[in-house]
Amino acid sequence: MRNFNKFGTAVAVAALFAATGTAARADDAAIQSLQQQINALQQQLKDVQAKQATVPAAGPLAGAATVPTEPSAIGPFVPASTQTGGFLQTGSDIGSFQVPGTKTAVKVGGFMKLDLAWDADAGMGIAGMDQYGIRQAADNTGNQGFALPGTPGARQQGRFSSTAAYSRLYIDSRTPTEWGDVKMYLEGDFSGPASGGNSNNSNSHDFRIRHAYGTLGNWTFGQTWTNFTDPASWAVSLDNNGPIGRESGVRQALVQYRWDIDPEQKNQLAVSIENPDSDFLGSDDKGENFIAGAGNYAYTNFNSKLPDFVAKYTHNETWGHMYEATLVRNLEANTVGVNLGSATTGYTGAVHDNTWAWGEQVGAKIFTGLGHPKNAIGFHGVIGQGISRYMQVQQNSAEVDSQGHLKTLLNGAYHVYYQHFWDPKGQFQSNVIWGDNKIWYKNSLLVATAPQGLETDVQEVELNFLWTPNQFVQMGPAYIRANVRAEQGYNLSGVAGATRSWSGSTAVDNRFQYSVIIGF
């Protein structure tokens, strides 16, 4: 019996080992089959990746903007990782989505901006609106700018105003093609004329186009910043029209091409042809030279035969950015035979003349690295003959002299600023900005008997403190002091409400402003 048990035990052990070996072989086969499936899936993934590599990436809003992107009035409202020196990076892929069934990626954004302003003196015009932007001295023809001493407006001490008209919306799209990314950018705000209402009821403002352009590779077509400006080096200001002392940031139709001189895009050269405007008689098409009291404005046939030509060179480094821009434009006068001056000094015949104008501008933004990596200093300087429409102080670019010839006027400006961040996260910043803009009028072109008020020098200083608690909100106060010096005071002898017969030549105002932006 004992031998039988030993034999049975041996058989059982042998059977167990046989079963175990069979199971092990079965497991090995299953593992090998699973490994083969994994290898097949990995190969399929590699094939898909290799196929995608041969097609332009359809990633959301890929590629850098050809034209400098738009700075908001007081900074960007996109995640902090895309902020660069206080400017809105519309070319980022943050918040974009791909249109189903296409290779086009779209980003929609914008912000609500509320400006609250209190002018301690006679007033700079409505808060943030264009009356202040053109920096005109208030006069007896309806100008709502600075009030010279003795004018009815100068009696006002203290004025509060507010507006949300500078709120914006934009659409940014990118589509990859074999020619490179096609970009479309459309932006507008509500600071157009208030044709639909007034402050007595609806406070409506018309929507206006700011930018409407497309790019293909290094080409840009449409309306956007003139090539003569450089938003990448602008100061961060609460003034919606930008601080005094640089080119004004004209937006107009253009065709632009940019050369990337090196692969790193450290050095770039852009040339453009842009929409012209023969503004020698002022932006309102009315003569600056006219017979006092006669109202003989010289309505003009503007024949802009040539576009404005602009070339700009930029240099980019980790320490900052600098640029130089050159502008050439042609001005033409073709008037009917009416008086363009006083009875004794003016020209009374028809004018058929043209002249060339030019402008030069340089600027830079340099990161100091002292206290915060984004602390920076910046400057701009611009000078030219006949470039008023490109400047913050927009008077006439040229005048008709007593011989009927069109003569350009010299215009020059500069400003400097310092940007300081107070905390490591960059939530608190201050900006100090000083600027000066001057026009040199030729004495022979002035009409002694006319109520002039033509400003020759505008100066401005701005101090602001801005808080950005998150990527969607920014707010802060600003103090702005500005003064306008006119070529001559106004003859107020016929102006109702004037406190003197002749005004002084300098108007001063102090503005306290608070702005809030909520974006998405």
Image (cartoon, rainbow, N blue to C red):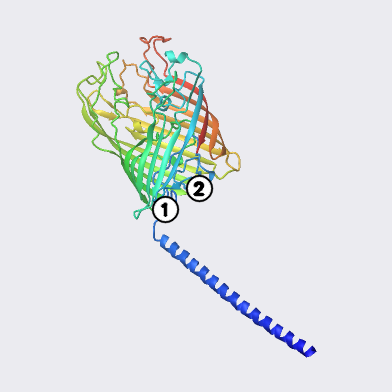
Report the disc number at residue 147: none
Give the crowd class for mark 1: few <14, some 14-19, many >=20 residues within 10 Å: some
Instruction: Depth check: give the residue in front, 355 or 134.
Output: 134
SS under mark 2 = loop
What is the three-letter code of the residue carrying label 2? Trp
> Could you tell me residue 355's position as x and y percent?
25, 33
Q: Which residue is mark 1?
A: 58
Q: Which residue is mark 2?
A: 319
Q: How many marks?
A: 2
Residue at the extreme front = 1
Q: Quadrant of residue 134?
A: top left
Instruction: Depth check: give the residue in front, 2 or 41.
Output: 2
Residue 51 falls left or right of residue 464: left
267 up-or-down from 152: above or below: below
Quadrant in which the N terminus appears:
bottom right
Residue sitting at x 47%, y 30%: 239
What is the three-letter code of the residue carrying label 1? Ala
**Disc 1 versus disc 2: nearer the observer:** 1
16 up-or-down from 300: above or below: below
> Is residue 226 visible in the rendered structure shown here?
no
> Could you tell me residue 475's position as x and y percent?
54, 33
